[in-house]
């Protein structure tokens, strides 16, 4: 186990939802797993007027998000955890009172011997990232002469390429790139990290991992929920910015990248940037028109329940042109992937929640066995990111009896079969990594910019281009009617069910 230094975690925006919903439960799991350092302090900072005790009640003792976890535990044990939490009211905005904040941090540092090691977690609107970084720097809280200082920022990292560059420059003015941790919670998922292990800890996949053997790659990220209470944010964002630019391109980069020389963070991140830079950027309107589909969910009835259309959701403009479905066909311009199409889609209000990667291998060059009931003879490697996490290989087996009749069979592995291993939740893993100074699973500035570089022309075309369509789809189906038109050859997406081995074509009949 790596050593974790004594430290203070300062959370800006601590009265917000993310702190109670994700960060504190993640810290609690680390506490239970004895992964927190001996001296560890959480200082919440935001604009609400709260005492330390009120903050402890809100995020620990009376938190709905911890209730189940605390149920059977001894009060002493829970109190010991809650006593690690403190609160500082920042007053009117995030741009004043840093002298007071600095003093509070210094006092806690002395009292708890946290050696000047501080993480600043910015869980605030992105417009505040740079002002907070600037204010921290002005009172010397970026200075690493005594103890290290790290800054965690949440997505979105910019709104487009230009704003992402400005944001990166803005943060780098006050903190070194090595101090900046851009969190993408998909990288905290075990199954996403396992993409690296599947590829580089086995000798059976990597020799086939190229244009000679792979026909195409399909990535589906589907959510059954709509925009819920986030209409205001989502309407300015859309599926491409909200999911594709970050989470999905991270997955793409792990599939595309070349083997790094070791598991050193910079080695892995260098290869990921190279992978993102090799994505073919679609520069002309016709190409974007032919290789992308966007859609928006419309009112429908799912399992007997009426479901609102996107434009009827709270805080969404009634004539909104924001996409809740995005599907992109793209290519990777390098030696390994020449001419292999990558199909990636992400959407809300689909029949089920699922994220998976499907590697479709080419059919054998020469067919010996003609007596096959299969119309689809390719081997597939299905990597299930969530739920029912696991890996499935589809391969041909002989049907017992005379002749050589071939059927597809499944070879499967489920994470749940590793019952004795505690699978860390994404935020738990990522927080611990940052606490230990490991940036492997955080996005670097050039990575984020390379992803925007690919996405920007599509966003521009969708906003200003000629002949751009927004296709409607009924909430609860697999996207617009024409969505299969994107897929060459076999001509349809694999529509997976909630379970890894469900046959494709999953749908919900109400
Ligand atoms: C977030 C998006 O980053 O990821 C949300 O902003 C989305 O819109 C969420 O619902 C999905 O995360 P997960 O882990 O549930 O797949």
Image (spheres, grey):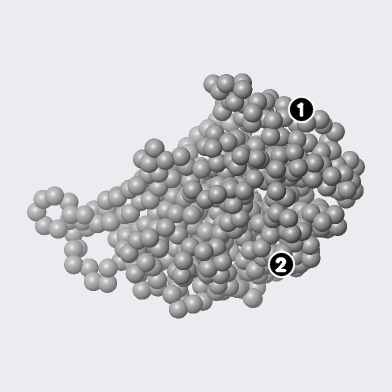
- Against 274, residue 20 (above or below) is above
The residue beneath circle 1 is 53
201 sits left or right of 16 in the view: left
Does the image show residue 132?
Answer: yes
Check the image and name the residue furthest to the bottom: 335
Pointer 2 or 1: first along the chain = 1
Q: Secondary structure at mark 1?
A: helix
Where residue 121 appears, as percent x and y from the top left, is 71, 48
49 sits left or right of 345 in the view: right
The residue beneath circle 2 is 161
- Residue drawn at 77 percent across, 57 percent down: 142
- Residue drawn at 48 percent across, 54 percent down: 193
Q: Secondary structure at mark 2?
A: helix
Mark 2: few, some, or many residues within 10 Å (few <14, many ≥20)?
A: many
Where residue 47 appears, as percent x and y from the top left, is 84, 40
Where residue 82 appears, as percent x and y from the top left, is 67, 30
Mark 1: few, some, or many residues within 10 Å (few <14, many ≥20)?
A: some
Mark 2 lies within 8 Å of ligand 1 (Cβ measured): no
Where residue 177 appears, as percent x and y from the top left, is 69, 64
């Amino acid at each position: 186990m790596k050593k974790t230094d004594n430290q203070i975690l300062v959370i800006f925006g601590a009265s917000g939802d993310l702190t109670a919903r994700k960060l504190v439960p993640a810290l609690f799991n680390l506490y239970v797993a004895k992964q927190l350092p001996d001296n560890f302090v959480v200082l919440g900072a935001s604009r609400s007027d709260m005492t330390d005790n009120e903050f402890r009640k809100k995020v620990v003792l009376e938190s709905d998000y911890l209730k189940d976890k605390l149920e059977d535990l001894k009060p002493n044990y829970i109190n010991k955890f809650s006593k690690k939490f403190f609160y500082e009211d920042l007053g009117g905005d995030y741009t004043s009172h840093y002298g007071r904040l600095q003093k509070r941090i210094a006092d806690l540092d002395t009292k708890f011997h946290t050696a000047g090691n501080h993480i600043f977690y910015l869980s605030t609107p992105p417009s505040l990232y740079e002002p907070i970084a600037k204010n921290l720097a002005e009172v010397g809280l970026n200075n690493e002469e005594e103890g290290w200082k790290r800054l965690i920022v949440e997505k979105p990292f910019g709104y487009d390429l230009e704003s992402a560059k400005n944001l990166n420059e803005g943060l780098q003015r006050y903190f070194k790139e090595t101090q900046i941790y851009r969190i993408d919670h998909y990288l905290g998922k075990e199954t996403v990290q396992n993409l690296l292990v599947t590829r580089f800890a086995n000798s059976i996949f990597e020799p086939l991992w190229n244009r000679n053997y792979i026909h195409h790659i399909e990535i589906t990220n589907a959510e059954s929920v709509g925009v819920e209470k986030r209409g205001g944010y989502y309407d300015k964002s859309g599926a491409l910015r909200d999911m594709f630019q970050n989470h999905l391109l991270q997955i793409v980069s792990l599939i595309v990248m070349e083997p790094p020389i070791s598991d050193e963070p910079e080695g892995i991140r260098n290869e990921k940037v190279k992978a993102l830079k090799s994505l073919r950027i679609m520069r002309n309107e016709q190409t974007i028109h032919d290789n992308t589909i966007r859609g928006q969910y419309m009112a429908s009835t799912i399992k007997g329940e009426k479901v609102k259309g996107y434009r009827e959701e709270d805080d969404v403009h009634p004539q909104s042109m924001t996409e809740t479905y995005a599907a992109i066909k793209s290519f990777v311009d390098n030696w390994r992937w020449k001419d292999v199409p990558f199909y990636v889609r992400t959407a809300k209000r689909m029949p089920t929640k699922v994220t998976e990667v499907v590697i479709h291998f080419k059919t054998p060059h020469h067919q010996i066995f003609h007596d096959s009931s299969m119309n689809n003879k390719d081997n597939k490697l299905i990597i299930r990111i969530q739920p029912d996490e696991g890996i499935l290989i589809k391969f041909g087996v002989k049907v017992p009896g005379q002749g050589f009749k071939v059927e597809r069979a499944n070879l499967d592995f489920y994470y749940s079969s590793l019952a004795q291993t505690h699978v860390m939740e994404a935020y738990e893993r990522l927080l611990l990594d940052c606490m230990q100074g490991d940036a492997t699973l955080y996005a670097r500035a050039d990575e984020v910019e390379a992803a925007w570089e690919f996405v920007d022309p599509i966003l521009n075309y969708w906003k200003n281009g000629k002949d751009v369509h927004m296709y409607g789809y009924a909430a609860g189906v697999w996207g617009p009617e024409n969505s299969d038109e994107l897929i060459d050859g076999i001509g349809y997406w694999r529509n997976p069910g909630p379970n890894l081995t469900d046959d494709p074509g999953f749908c919900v009949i109400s």
